[in-house]
Amino acid sequence: MAKRCQITGKTVMAGNNVSHANNRTRRRFLPNLQQASMQSEILDRKISLRISTSAIRTVEKHGGIDAFLMQARNSELADEARLLKREMMAAQAKS
């Protein structure tokens, strides 16, 4: 499974461990990903996503997954989130 947030697209970053003697060795910074289920009122179902903790906080700040996806620009969203947003827009247009 890819170490990538399904909403924000946050992924693995690389950097250096720097010792006291200033020796540098490569390391990876992994995102803090969690499995989360969120209720969508527009789609009337639960959505299970693997997202970062910072994304969970952002979604809660905006008032839920529906409000967050509707106000976010498509260029800021990961592929999975764009598909969810498209589903939500189609469900809104239908009703």
Image: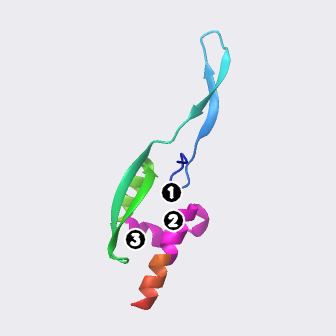
Q: Which residue is mark 2?
A: 81
Residue 17 in percent (x, y) is at 60, 22
Q: Which residue is mark 1?
A: 6
Regarding mark 3 in the picture, which secondary structure is present there? helix
**Quick one: 62 or 94, which is closer to the camera?**
94
Instruction: Please give the range of residues in magenta.
Output: 65-86
Q: Main secondary structure of the magenta part?
A: helix
Is 70 contained in the magenta span? yes
**Is tag 1's residue or tag 2's residue first in the polypeptide sequence?**
1
Residue 69 in percent (x, y) is at 46, 68
Q: Which residue appears at 39% of the width and 60% of the height?
A: 48
Looking at the picture, which amino acid does disc 1 mark? Gln
Is 5 contained in the magenta span? no
Regarding mark 2 in the picture, which secondary structure is present there? helix
**Quick one: 75 or 85, which is closer to the camera?**
85
Q: CA distance from mark 1 to mark 3?
A: 15 Å
Q: Residues within 10 Å of mark 1 (few under 14, many from 20)?
A: many
Q: Which residue appears at 61% of the width and 65% of the height?
A: 75
Q: Nearer the viewer, mark 1 or mark 3?
A: 1
Q: Which residue is mark 3?
A: 66
Query: Badges 1 and 2: C-beta atoms under 8 Å apart?
Result: yes
Q: Which residue appears at 56% of the width and 68% of the height?
A: 73
Regarding mark 1 in the picture, which secondary structure is present there? loop
**Is tag 1's residue or tag 3's residue first in the polypeptide sequence?**
1
